Amino acid sequence: MTQNTTDAFHALAREHLPEEIAERWIGLLRPGLRLAKATDPEADVVVGRLGGLPELPEGEEWPVWEGHGPLTFIASLDCAALPSEALDIALPADGTLFFFYFDGQLDDGRAAVSPYEPDSQAGARVLYVASGVPLVERSAPAGIRPYTEVRLTARTDATAPYPWHPVIYREFAPMPDDHPLWDDDFREALSDLPGAGHLAGGHADPVQDDVESEVARAALGNPPGDDPRINEEALRWTLLAQIDSDDDAGMMWGDCGALYWLIRPEDLAARRFDRTLFTWQCS
């Protein structure tokens, strides 16, 4: 994405789509926070970081996937520093979010965290620590190599729904195979825009298929693929954070993949981060 992503999306839609469909599609754009490496110490507001060692409350146990071992610290976000007033989700106004994932360091990748195995969701975790709680830097557990620390800054950016996102079907159904949103020229123009990278809020940028349907499977206990409840459940989930592969941090999720944590808006409002669900994708 670029700093003029909103204008780029508007122009692209109006160039490739019929007017009425273009305006309805534009109405589905959502604001997200693009998280990128902070490079200017004078101008960049640091809102979080990838890797390094987390600062946790002294009494907080390091997250563990029972039967497999401790999770690896992936990222943290300083909610007070995030420009979250621009978002359409209710992130906390202060405190810190910590993201952990069982990344295969301890078992050479044999145990995978997957929405198709709902019990494996214990291999990814989000911790929220309210402001004012004393924090202490914690050493990584034995066998865990911390990722290289990368400080992050944020800016608001428009995000677009994946062409086969359930919200597309809800807005435009019925959708014949030759629907303009599935036209090759429009989809190719969308794919020519730079990828989202790391995100907080907004529409996820999937590497493969929509991530909302994947976590819906986990929420429903992995029903058959044609279960109509999947699309209904997928509409209940929204992206909390997306962490892309990152050379500076030494993070590579499969073949240039990304990690996704999603949450229901009502659980976000209630600060029930223990109810987040996780998926990951790679090319």
Image (tube, grey):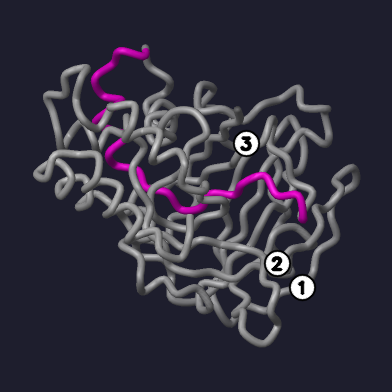
Q: What residue is shown at x 36% (from left), y 74% (from top)?
A: 85
Marks 2 and 3, the one that precedes in the sequence: 2
Q: Name the residue under label 2.
A: 56
Q: In this view, does 195 lie to the left or right of 216?
A: right
Q: In which quarter of the image is residue 180?
A: top left
Q: Where is residue 204 in the image (x, y as percent from the top left)?
A: 44, 45
Q: Mark 1 points at which residue?
A: 136
| Separation of residues labelled 2 and 3 (CA atoms) | 28 Å
Q: Mark 3 points at which residue?
A: 257
Residue 37 highlighted magenta (yes or no): no
Q: What residue type is labelled 2?
A: Leu
Q: Quadrant of residue 47?
A: bottom right
Q: What residue is shown at x 9% (from left), y 44% (from top)?
A: 20
Q: What residue is shown at x 25% (from left), y 39% (from top)?
A: 16
Marks 1 and 2, the one that precedes in the sequence: 2
Q: Residues within 10 Å of mark 1 (few under 14, many from 20)?
A: some
Which of the two discs, 2 and 3, sits closer to the camera?
A: 3
Whether the residues at callouts 1 and 2 have beta carbons within 8 Å, the answer is yes
Which residues, given as a range, are shown in magenta?
225-248
**Would you place residue 150 above or below residue 115 in this image?**
below
Q: Is mark 1 on a helix, strand or loop?
A: strand
Q: In this view, does 165 lie to the left or right of 63?
A: left
Q: What residue type is labelled 1?
A: Val
Q: Residues within 10 Å of mark 3 (few under 14, many from 20)?
A: some
In the image as oriented, which residue stretches furthest toward the bottom? 42
